[in-house]
């Protein structure tokens, strides 16, 4: 069963969405382009802008947060526009319905959707403009369009006639946008599918790439915001006298989330913030602590209402009558996103209009939330997206954007709000903690005859998009159903609100569900006394893409031969974001301390846009997933997040990063997403390797020495 | 009293208070944005600059301590990406979000001035204080070796 996240979000996001016919060119794009090009800019459609001086600007409707859309989105347009990538400029789109992500129903960068959403849409966009340019040339030359062709920024016609795109742009932009265009046969692609140098790299090696933290506006002041140490708490009263007297301080203002010190430099604001005296109403969150929250999850798992994800046959009956059964519970902790660039945004609210500049994954959300907070219309807000110093889901949230706008309103000046790392760690929207209860019955041939899967966790979608209670959160069902043939299977979900705010975190529930499913199938293989690779393969039936990636991973990792002395291997398999993936982890364990020696990743993600970026994304996802697997957890005591910075929330360092061997399956299937699945799969691969190494089944992440010792 | 030092070869005079971390002086007063803030406690390396050729965390370096010294930031490598490290970073497509990369480059640059042919262990030691949340570590290792080769060939 394919659950439609899309339909859900289309109906619920503030932004609305769906296919937009026709378009207007947002004013901000024009303004941005004026700084890039000389002469008039013509806009045949929302994706391609061509200036008189022949500068071609392609629009990326997705935010660049490391995943490469600043290159891959233009590649798709340029392929059909027939223009050399070296000759184009790129602008990140402002909020506009025309830039809606059809897979998510709003202008959102996330869910590994950018290529999947843009695959046809952007090529059509490029082909439309190519057709319009050719028609404009044919009209000018009074020849038939079939005698003209567009090539590398020029249109060529009979008798050696030629004209640049820039020359033709004005006439082309006046033509109707063609409804039906013919797209290239993929075998004729010249850009798409080839490893291409990223267009953002040059600016990222000499310090010129602009992130949110780098934004400067004339007359801009700097803000540092003290928020309640208990998330959700409110200011009762505060005394700013000392802070006001500190050098450089311009004002101290209260906003909904806390008290902001505004100064003429960041450091002055930050220093003055230290001497604020604030009385907080900590609210109900003050009682939260991790142990009782996990106890609450266990209680809910036993008693609360169950929502069905999928049901086949009668697993309960088969389990009740079975002679050989296996049961296990898996626990996952809260996690922080910890993007390298702490949260920040710049806002300038004056005269009823608000300019917002900064790093966001959700342009329309920012526009809507700030409009609501300031009591102005969304049209009165312009938003420019900078490069993001990491996203991972954290920059889908809008808290820091609203804060910047409120502070700007309070002081009547352009303001850059910058969080500290401690603010960031303590005021995240955390990946929810989770409990899986699994049970299976094995038949005489040791194959599973029944399986029950129950996930108990918190719904991000209820909080973020107002999903109704007691309805299935499709994001929680991701990768819940593993590919193995089991005649009777019940997959259930229990949604339990622990009281801490939660958010989408790279690979979302794939990471939760794949850990439980891929650990549990490994447990079944062990009970069946079978090789975990062979056992999985025997349960795949006729699912060639699953079987293929699994076989290739085993081959690449040398599964058939003994690992080097002292090392052990674990394997895991999953489909996520339309990508089929298998991983093998090769590790050793000494005194309960894991060393990862090698990770093998085989991915079949259908057609690829930029294979070099695909490989980079897999590396990135593995490292991100290994951080969570080996080290990371967020804990609470007295309502306060206990971790504050990278010393107590350690993310993977270079010395811990193993060689990562990536095998990409050549495929003509439609593209799958690759920004996330490898993050989900590395956890179970390593945990299964720990079992192979030690005989201990660690059912609780992270795989720290303490958790291994307790297993 | 202003603090005078050399920034990327130019003498500058900074008015910020002497206890202001060099990071914020470079960024907010002197207007060079390449050096980044990641943690503020010396844990991430995003703020790495050179002081008299040695890599330091500028978030942990009070302005007053660089009086009369030579400070170099990522902008000093080159503005046209001609430095062997910048070329290698581009050839290997190291950056993802790119936020940590100024610090990575400055740690690597310091390494290559002392070691012309760094071993894996030396690379690890020099680079282990620079976090990359995007996980570009394996490409960083490879790019440092490429740059080292080019610099040896040039020498
Ligand atoms: S900001 Fe200086 S080490 Fe992290
Ligand atoms: S490239 Fe994003 S943190 Fe290193």
Image (cartoon, coloured by chain):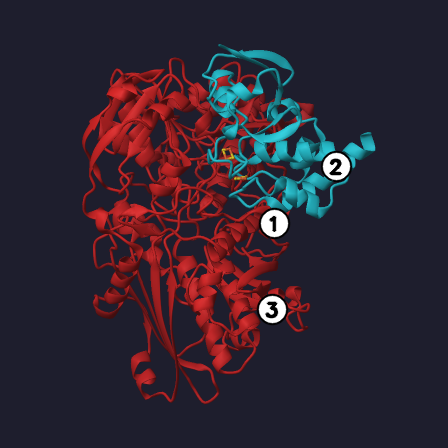
Q: Chain of mark 2?
A: B
The location of residue A553, given as percent across then percent down, is 61, 64
Label 2 belongs to which residue? B115
Q: Chain of mark 3?
A: A
Q: Are marks 1 and 2 in contact (CB under 8 Å)?
A: no
Label 1 belongs to which residue? A655
Q: Chain of mark 1?
A: A
Mark closest to the chain's N terminus, 1 or 3:
3
Q: How many marks?
A: 3
Vertical placement of B7 versus A705: above or below? above
Chain B on-screen colour: cyan
Callout 3: SS: strand
Q: Residue at x 41, y 23 (%)?
A: A267
Kindly indicate the quadrant of the structure image that contains residue A495.
bottom left
For the residues beneath circles 1 and 3, the answer to whether they share a chain is yes
Mark 1–mark 3 Cα distance, whole angstroms, equals 20 Å
**Residue A568: assigned label:** 3
Q: Residue at x 60, y 49 (%)?
A: A615
Residue density around tag 3, few if under 14, some if 14–19, many if 20 or more, within 10 Å: many
The location of residue A170, given as percent across then percent down, is 49, 20
The location of residue B114, given as percent across then percent down, is 73, 34
The location of residue A55, given as percent across then percent down, is 56, 22
Q: Foreground residue, A259 or A533?
A: A259
Callout 1: SS: helix
Residue density around tag 1, few if under 14, some if 14–19, many if 20 or more, within 10 Å: some
Residue density around tag 2, few if under 14, some if 14–19, many if 20 or more, within 10 Å: few
Vertical placement of A185 versus A681: above or below? above
Tell me if residue A447 can be seen. yes
Tell me if residue A416 can be seen. no
Left or right of B56, for residue A518: left
Mark 3–mark 2 Cα distance, whole angstroms, equals 35 Å
Q: Residue at x 32, y 88 (%)?
A: A321
């Amino acid at each position: 069963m394919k659950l439609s996240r899309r339909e859900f979000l289309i109906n619920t996001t503030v932004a609305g969405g769906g296919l937009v016919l026709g378009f207007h060119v947002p004013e901000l794009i024009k303004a941005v382009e004026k700084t890039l090009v000389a002469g008039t800019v013509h806009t045949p459609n929302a994706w391609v802008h061509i200036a008189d001086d022949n500068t071609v600007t392609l629009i990326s409707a997705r935010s660049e947060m490391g995943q490469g859309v600043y290159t891959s989105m233009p590649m798709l347009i340029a392929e059909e526009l027939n223009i050399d990538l070296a000759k184009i400029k790129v602008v990140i789109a402002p909020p506009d319905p025309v830039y809606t992500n059809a897979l998510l129903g709003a202008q959102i960068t996330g869910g590994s959707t950018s290529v999947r959403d843009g695959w046809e849409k952007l090529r059509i966009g490029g082909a439309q403009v190519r057709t319009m340019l050719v028609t404009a040339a044919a009209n000018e030359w009074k020849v038939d369009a079939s005698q003209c062709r567009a090539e590398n920024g020029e249109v060529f016609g009979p008798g050696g006639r030629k004209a640049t795109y820039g020359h033709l742009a004005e006439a082309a932009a006046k033509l109707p946008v063609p409804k039906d265009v013919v797209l290239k046969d993929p075998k004729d692609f010249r850009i798409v599918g080839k490893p291409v140098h990223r267009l953002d790299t040059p600016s990222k090696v000499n310090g010129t790439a602009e992130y949110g933290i780098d934004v400067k506006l004339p007359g801009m002041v700097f803000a540092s915001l003290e928020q309640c140490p208990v998330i959700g708490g409110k200011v009762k009263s505060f005394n700013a006298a000392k802070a006001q007297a500190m050098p450089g301080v311009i004002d101290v203002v209260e906003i909904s989330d806390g008290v902001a010190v505004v100064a003429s430099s960041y450091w002055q604001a930050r220093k003055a913030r230290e001497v604020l005296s604030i009385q907080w109403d900590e609210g109900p969150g003050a009682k939260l602590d991790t142990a009782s929250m996990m106890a609450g999850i266990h209680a809910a798992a036993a008693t609360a209402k169950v929502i069905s994800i999928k049901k086949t046959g009668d697993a309960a009956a088969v389990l009740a009558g079975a002679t050989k059964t296996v049961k296990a519970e898996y626990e996952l902790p809260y996690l922080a996103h910890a993007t390298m660039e702490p949260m920040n945004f710049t806002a300038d609210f004056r005269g009823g209009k608000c300019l917002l500049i900064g790093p966001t994954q959700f342009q329309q959300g920012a526009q809507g939330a700030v409009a609501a907070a300031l009591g102005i219309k969304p049209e009165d807000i312009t938003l420019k997206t900078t490069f993001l110093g990491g996203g991972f889901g954290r920059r889908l949230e809008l808290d820091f954007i609203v804060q910047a706008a409120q502070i700007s309103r309070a002081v009547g000046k352009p303001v850059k709000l910058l969080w500290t790392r401690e603010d960031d760690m303590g005021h995240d929207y955390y990946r929810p903690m989770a409990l899986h209860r699994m049970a299976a019955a094995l038949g005489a041939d040791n194959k599973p005859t029944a399986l029950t899967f129950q996930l108990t966790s918190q719904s991000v979608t209820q909080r973020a998009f107002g999903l109704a209670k007691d309805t299935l959160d499709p994001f929680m069902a991701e990768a819940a159903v593993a590919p193995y043939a089991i005649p009777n299977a019940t997959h259930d979900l229990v949604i339990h609100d622990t009281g801490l705010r939660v958010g989408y975190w790279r690979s979302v529930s794939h990471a939760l569900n794949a850990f439980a499913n891929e650990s549990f199938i490994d447990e079944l293989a062990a009970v069946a006394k079978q090789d975990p690779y062979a056992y999985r393969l025997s349960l795949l039936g006729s699912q060639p893409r699953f079987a293929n990636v699994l076989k290739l991973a085993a081959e690449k990792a040398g599964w058939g031969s003994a690992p080097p002395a002292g090392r052990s291997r674990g394997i895991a398999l999953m489909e996520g974001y339309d990508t089929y993936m298998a991983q093998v982890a090769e590790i050793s364990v000494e005194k309960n301390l894991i060393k990862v020696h090698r990770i093998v990743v085989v991915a079949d993600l259908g057609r690829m846009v930029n294979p070099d970026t695909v490989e980079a994304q897999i590396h990135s996802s593995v490292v991100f997933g290994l951080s969570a697997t080996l080290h990371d957890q967020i804990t609470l005591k007295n309502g306060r997040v206990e971790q504050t910075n990278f010393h107590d929330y350690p993310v993977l360092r270079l010395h811990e990063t193993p060689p990562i061997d990536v095998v990409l399956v050549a495929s003509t299937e439609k593209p799958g997403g690759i920004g996330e699945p490898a993050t989900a799969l590395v956890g179970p691969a390593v945990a299964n390797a720990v079992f192979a190494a030690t005989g201990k089944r660690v059912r609780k992440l992270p795989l720290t020495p303490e958790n291994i010792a307790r297993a | 009293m202003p603090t005078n030092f050399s920034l990327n070869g130019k003498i500058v005079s900074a008015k910020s208070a002497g206890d202001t971390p060099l990071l914020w002086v470079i960024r907010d007063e002197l207007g060079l944005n390449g050096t980044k803030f990641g943690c503020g406690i010396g844990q991430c390396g995003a703020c790495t600059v050179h002081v008299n050729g040695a890599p330091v965390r500028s978030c942990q370096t009070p302005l007053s301590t660089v009086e009369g010294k030579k400070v170099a930031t990522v902008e000093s490598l080159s503005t046209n990406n001609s430095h062997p490290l910048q070329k290698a970073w581009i050839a290997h497509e190291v950056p993802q979000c790119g936020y940590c990369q100024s610090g990575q480059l400055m740690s690597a640059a310091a390494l290559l001035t002392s070691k012309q042919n760094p071993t894996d262990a030396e690379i690890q030691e020099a680079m282990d204080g620079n976090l990359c949340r995007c996980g570009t570590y394996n490409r960083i290792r490879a790019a440092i070796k490429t740059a080292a080769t080019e610099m040896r060939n040039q020498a």
